[in-house]
Image: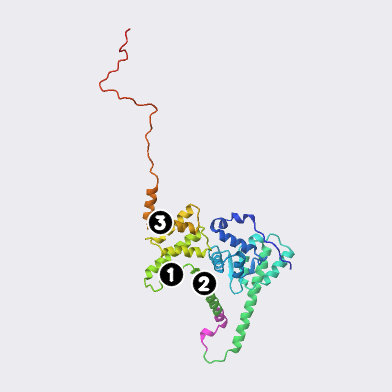
Amino acid sequence: MRVAKFRKVRIDFWMDPMVSEEMTPEDRYFYLYLLTNQRSTQIGIYQITKKQMAFDMGYSIESVHSLMERFITHHQLIRYNPETRELAIKNWGENNFDKAGKPMMDCICSELKAVKDASLIQYVSELIQKQEFRSLYESFCKKEEFIFNEKVREQDETATDLTPECEEIDDTLTNPHTIRGQEVDKDKDKDKDKDKDKDKEKQQEVLDPQMESNPKSDDTIHNNQKLVDVKEIVEFWDNNGFGFSNVNGKQQLLTWLDDSRFLQPKAVILKAMNIACANNKRRLTYVVAILKNWENESLLSVEEIDSHVESQKPVQKHWQSKESFPRGRDIPSGFDLDITAGEDW
């Protein structure tokens, strides 16, 4: 089967509100990579490792993990199976299935056969609009479901044959199929919980260094408040274009929570970041320069900073309008004007 050497990206990709309003530049770059990389397939499901993504994009593996977590939980555009290393793009069928023909259908069929996680097939099929393509996806979902049920039935029969005869039978064991299904579900739930725990551990990469600065402290309230401050600064950084994948920059900025003389470090840092956004200077060096300037001038609270800014504003002077002619001398009181004086008629 000949594999296509190109992928289509529609021109209305940039007019999608999610792309234009919700995604950061890093998000758009990552999304285009997912749609067009060399491992992508005709069905929107393909195997790829995070290490390969990091190598192709020039990112660290931690940055790729953060981006994938954002696309899975926030944008909800992809799913990833860490065991089979298969990635599925949710809206693939909306933009890539225009015309149905035998070469196209044969290619899709062969690629669907190679998918290991059938739930990803169901995930992509939900947004396929053309019925002929959707029916093909659903047929593979039914085949996988049938095979799974057959395996469970065979296991149940084997378990029944090997069960020793007992005079007393517990009522809870009279339905091995149900119990086996529950055990399978529990195992899946445990695996999902483990994956979620791993994701949470990765998300703490930025937060943990800040919380470990005083590991022996028993002041729980202080630590909880500090964690809230860290999360608020990181969320502002991520949501305002400072660089979602710039983990090192976030960690350097967060050191100002402990290594500064500010009385309100979180509020002062957020104020500096707001100024950077207002001036379209979304860079760590710009924010740090603002903070150093305030610290050198002993402006240690938001109130002192605001007061200093107000005092630096130029005073507007209201000048009185000058007359276009000289005023001359005032007319003395008691003077009577006689326009005929000094004239003899």
Q: Identify which amino acid the numbered label 2 is placed on.
A: Lys
State how many labels appear.
3
Q: Does label 2 or label 1 sit earlier along the sequence? A: 2
Where 307 sits versus 249, above or below?
above
Q: Identify which amino acid the numbered label 3 is placed on.
A: Trp
For disc 1, the neighbor class at 10 Å (few under 14, some 14 to 19, many from 20) is: some
Bounds of the magenta segment: 169-181
Question: Is most of the magenta stretch helix, strand or loop?
Answer: helix
Residue 206 is left or right of residue 344, and the answer is: right
For disc 3, the neighbor class at 10 Å (few under 14, some 14 to 19, many from 20) is: some
Give how far across and how far down residue 277 sits, in percent.
Answer: 48, 54
Mark identifier at residue 211: 1
Say which quadrant the N terminus sits in: bottom right
- The residue lying furthest to the left in this view is 334
Q: Name the residue under label 2.
A: 196
Query: 148 or 87, which is in the foreground?
Result: 87
Q: Identify which amino acid the numbered label 1 is placed on.
A: Met
Image marks 2 and 1: residues in contact by CB distance under 8 Å: no
Q: What element carries label 3?
A: helix
Mark identifier at residue 294: 3
Give how far across and how far down residue 161 sits, in percent.
Answer: 61, 88
